[in-house]
Image (cartoon, rainbow, N blue to C red):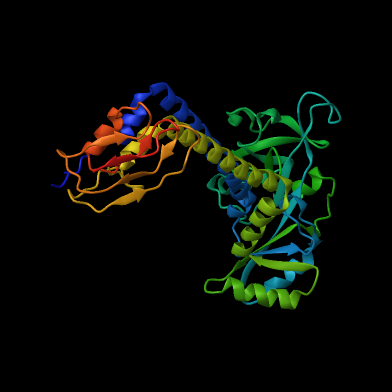
Amino acid sequence: MAVAPKKSNLVWSNLVHNKVRTLVGVTGIAFAVILIFMQLGFLGSANATATLIYKQMDFDLLMLSSDYVEFSRSSTFARHRLTRVLAEPEVADAVPVYVGFPFWKKEPGPPGALGKREILLIGFPPEKVVFRLPEVRAAQDRLTLADTVLFDRHSRDSFGVPDEPVLLLGHRHYWVNQTLVRIAGTFSLGSGFIADGLILTSAANYARLVGQEGSLNSVHLGLIKLKQGADPETMADALNERLGPGVHVWTRSLLESREKTFWVEETALGVIFRCGVLVAVLVGIVFVYQVISSDIGSRLKEFATLKAIGYGDRYPRLHDHPAGGAAGTVWLPARPAGGVRVVRAGGRVGRDSHRVQRRAAGGRADPLRQRAADHGGFVFGVGTAGARETEVG
């Protein structure tokens, strides 16, 4: 007579059997998961901020010096190299952009006083469209006035600009190097890991603020816009052949890929973040292993018996066992004294016809083994070292 399969919610029973153990296990695993995602977030921030400024610039191709490293270390090239590309029929416009790192300081106090901070300054012709941000486009006409800047709201609070900068418009409250400037408007962009703050200004104001007035012949970035229908990759290859050494023209996709590779793989910041992800994964593996190992180790005898009565290795449900099954032997990892033993089950086994014998001096049939035999005949010896085997027949 066959034994009907039985369903048992073993997972839930194990969880609620010892609530303190379950809470500790869940807390440990949750900590490991949070740690992994936190480190992945740090690594993702390096990817995202690597191209933060470039993504908001309006260009199809970008001309850079051959000595370019990354945005904050963009060497200069002669402006006439950029002007030459305007002769190409596929080129619609070429705009010079200037990058500097002057000192920013809030009034009062002379520019040499303590409290000054380095800030990223980007200069460009205000009559040209350089940034895609609507806030910048709406306010860049104000940059034609002398000593005016647009301030990035995502800059650090330590720069001293309040959340309501409208009150500051037209008022001189800040030094940039040796010059008092006005905040003519604000925008939201961010500067990533390269600086704590960002301001925009006109090319003429840039020259004044960094002490290069009247000399704008050295360009940091050359934004090239193509006419409709022109292929950026084909034009980049053609310009690189014609312009010769000293400069290189990049497509947007190649430039963004290069920046991400540099920040993630070539900087100490990227190495630290990648190592952090690896350590977090290892810590997670250790936590999960310890939780599972502790749970299994505390219930090893029960798991052995459950396997004996028909539970498979993968699925927590009982299998059918025919009343007249063939003899078989089930193996589990051996334990030291008092561990799991090999048990032999043979002959005709049924729910109402069985006997359980324990070959140990003075030993009686274990109720757990008796119950296991009732469920199909595969029984594990779980007891002292003196128990040799348990037979069911």
Q: Residue at the front extreme?
A: 361
Residue at image x 65%, y 72%?
A: 236
- Nearest the eye: 84 or 312: 312
Residue at image x 73%, y 78%?
A: 241
Q: Is residue 240 above or below residue 23?
A: below
Q: Is residue 306 above or below residue 128?
A: above
Residue at image x 37%, y 32%?
A: 360
Quadrant hosting residue 244: bottom right
Q: Is residue 30 left or right of residue 181?
A: left
Query: Residue 298 in the image: x percent, y percent?
Result: 43, 29
The C terminus lies in quadrant = top left
Q: Is residue 252 visible?
A: yes
Query: Residue 56 in the image: x percent, y percent?
Result: 58, 52
How many marks are shown on the rendered structure? 0
Quadrant hosting residue 66: bottom right
- Nearest the eye: 386 or 58: 386
Q: Is residue 252 left or right of residue 73?
A: left
Q: Is residue 192 visible?
A: no
Query: Residue 152 in the image: x percent, y percent?
Result: 63, 39
- Nearest the eye: 15 or 296: 296
Q: Residue at the top extreme?
A: 20
Query: Residue 312 in the image: x percent, y percent?
Result: 32, 47
Q: Is residue 326 above or below residue 387?
A: below
